[in-house]
Image: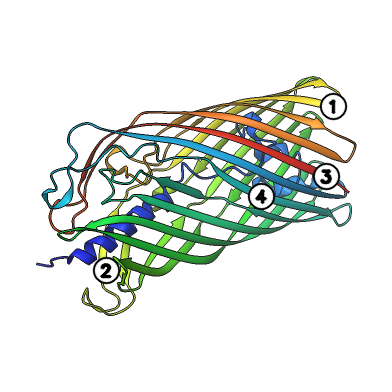
Amino acid sequence: MKTDTPIQCAIAAALASFTAGAQATGFQLEQNASGLGNAYSGQAAAAENASTIFYNPAGMTRLPGKQLGVVLTFIGPTIKFSDTGGSAAPGGLPSPGGNGGDAGGWTLVPKGYFSYQLNNRVWLGLGLSVPFGLKTEYAEGWLGRFQSRRAELKTIDLNPSVAFKVSDAVSLGAGVSYQKADVKVDRSTFLGIEIPTKITLEDESWGYNLGALFTLSPATRIGVTYRSRIEHDLTGSAVVAGVAAPSVRATAELPDTISWGIAHQVNPKWELLGDITYTRWSSIKGVPIVATSTSALGAAGTTLDTFNFQFKDSYRIGAGANWQWRDDFVLKFGVAYDRSPVEDRFRTVVFPDDDRIWLALGGKYRMSKQSVLDFGYAHLFMKDASISQLRGLGIGGQGNVVGNYDNMVNIFSIQYSHTF
């Protein structure tokens, strides 16, 4: 029977933390401020500005001339764990530690977009976005530090796009995505004494997006958009207590998404929006962790561990409204229900996610004929999330974390758009 060494346990545990964070993206990030006030309802049909390059490239056909958009989004999750008395540290440590404080915190996420009308039929665009992001950081000495203390995922996506106006009623769009992913994970390992473990991984890969926009009448638009899966073959290094361990690889597939949106102008004062978005997380069942160099852990190609996440497909349903308060100012409102891809029994300390409800408010101020300022705020009420993660209690194990999470998220975003 195969017996894992302590270092092998450390590497596998840290990579398990990374994979859960990279894949279970209830932290799948939104990409503009103009949609935040509507809880991102109807973004496949809204096409208000150049950020439509991300949500539906066909929407560029509604943008005359050249348009530049710059977005700053501030995301502030609150992640608080409470031990229910069942938690234990590895190796029989008498004092497993505290609850970890607030593992969330504020993060700034910038994005930018540029659209260009080539002629009456063709538009070109370029988007720079951050489609996935995650950071959890617990206080020193927290009881789950043997599973993960700090984890961070960053992605950057460069998305050149093209749109074609088939007719006044139909527009089509497409784009390619060049995406870079970086992952860092810090945790503790118990080898008679507690020592640090650090994992760094990165990859660059490609995907694509497609969109269609249908103008049913001067008052009603319907948009349909698809973003493809992007497979990352992440490679990097693992360091245990300052000693280099074997290089490692983990293949992670960020899921594809399809969205349907509608925008309907009820009268000169009111516009209604709605959407249904479906994300196919169920493609992720197990993630093998593979050594890429020969060491005491085994030959190159050895599978160190396989993690069985069993993600489920997720969806969100949103509804929003815009009220033309003044000629130069629009008030925005929105609500949404967002289902998490995480099953209760597979929840991790890196991504203690659960279903959430969005309440959002925002506005659009026309500063001049060429310039618009959008801003929005959303509060995400999250369902209490239970966790029970047993990752071994012996030498090199990762402890048993049992308890509950009380989470919420606040999002604020501001966007400047300028038409040339």
Vertical placement of 244 versus 17: above or below? below
- Name which of mark 3 and mark 1 comes first in the sequence: 1
Q: Alpha carbon of mark 2 to alpha carbon of mark 4: how far?
A: 38 Å
Secondary element under disc 3, as helix, strand or loop, is strand
Vertical placement of 282 versus 184: above or below? above
Q: Please report the residue visible at 83 percent of the width from the left and 44 percent of the height from the top.
A: 418
Q: Alpha carbon of mark 4 to alpha carbon of mark 3: how far?
A: 15 Å
Q: Position of residue 185 (x, y in %)?
A: 38, 57
Q: Position of residue 203 (x, y in %)?
A: 49, 66
Assess whether mark 1 and mark 4 are in contact (beta carbons under 8 angstroms): no
Q: Alpha carbon of mark 4 to alpha carbon of mark 1: how far?
A: 25 Å
Quarter holding the N terminus? bottom left
Which residue corresponds to mark 2?
303
- Name which of mark 4 and mark 3 comes first in the sequence: 4
Secondary element under disc 4, as helix, strand or loop, is strand
Which residue corresponds to mark 3?
418
Is residue 303 shown left or right of residue 407? left
**What numbered label is drawn on residue 111?**
4
